[in-house]
Image (cartoon, grey):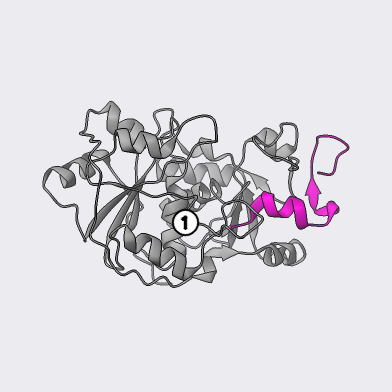
Amino acid sequence: MVQQVLYRALVSTKWLAESVRSGKLGPGLRVLDASWYSPGTREARKEYQERHVPGASFFDIEECRDTASPYEMMLPSEAHFGDYVGRLGISNDTHVVVYDGDNLGSFYAPRVWWMFRVFGHRTVSVLNGGFRNWLKEGHPVTSEPTHPEPATFKATLDRSLLKTYEQVLENLESRRFQLVDSRSQGRYSGTEPEPDAVGLGSGHIRGSVNMPFMDFLTEDGFEKSPEELRAMFQGKKVDLSQPLIATCRKGVTACHIALAAYLCGKPDVAVYDGSWSEWFRRAPPETRVSQGQGGKA
């Protein structure tokens, strides 16, 4: 098998700072702040307006999603995504760097990294260490608004990187894919409630393995090394040579699994977009496992 040459999924704060300093940002290189926080905690857009990487635009994941869906954070249409990122000055030839301001170092940025990839764009990277380390290292910030020249972006959905409810349901019988859940152990097992959720119990899809996404990051907020990541997958008996689906609550932190596997040389992890938010509301009760109230979720 010919080894596929993978585009770099991570760029360093030092690399980005040098790119900003040398005036590289423009049609060929765009930077996005993809921060999102639970309502009532922090205000992502306000924080962006106060300080961001010079030249960065704000990627509002609340705007770039399927707002008609009853489930959380579902992918927008090809046309919606293409129009949205085109207005941010991104074309099919742009290298996109994504970061967020989460205290963990990275939270929503891998979701946007995956969104670009699922819509056919390969030249996209996550800022390793995030805005947290950009600030800690003393790199420049600005409150100046960014006004990129609009560009044309043609989005083409890559269905191999996306899984639907029906496909995951069928997989319970066929077991063609391994299924990995990135939520915390308590939410996965059903012993802790889903935060900020109305009518959504906790628990997991039958047969899924738990790998909390926070474990992929160091205490300083950087992605762990490929060697450490491989050992983590092996420790959970997840075979990176076999097909893999990532799931979570709403298809966001599942993208950390896709990113970690990519860094290990596996670029084909599919994300179940509806994740637990959809599964809990649609799936037969016997497919939902919970150690919480009464067993089944």
Q: Residue at x 22, y 42 (%)?
A: 54
Rendered view: 61 above or below 172: above
Residue shown at 20% from the left, 34% from the top: 140
Please name whichever residue, 230 or 204, is drawn nearer the observer in this view of the structure. Answer: 204
Q: Is residue 226 left or right of residue 281?
A: left
Q: Is residue 201 visible?
A: yes
Residue 45 in picture, x, y percent from top left? 40, 40
Residue type at numbered disc 1: Cys
Determine crowd level at label 1: few under 14, some 14-19, many 20+ residues with C-alpha closer than 10 A. many
Above or below, 297 against 240 in this view is above
Q: Quadrant of the N terminus?
A: bottom left
In the rendering, at what x and y percent does residue 278 appear? 69, 54
Residue to which mark 1 is pinned: 64
In the rendered structure, which segment of residues is drawn in magenta? Answer: 272-297
Q: Nearer the viewer, residue 67 or 139?
A: 67
Q: Is residue 54 above or below residue 94?
A: above
In which quarter of the view is residue 179 placed? bottom right
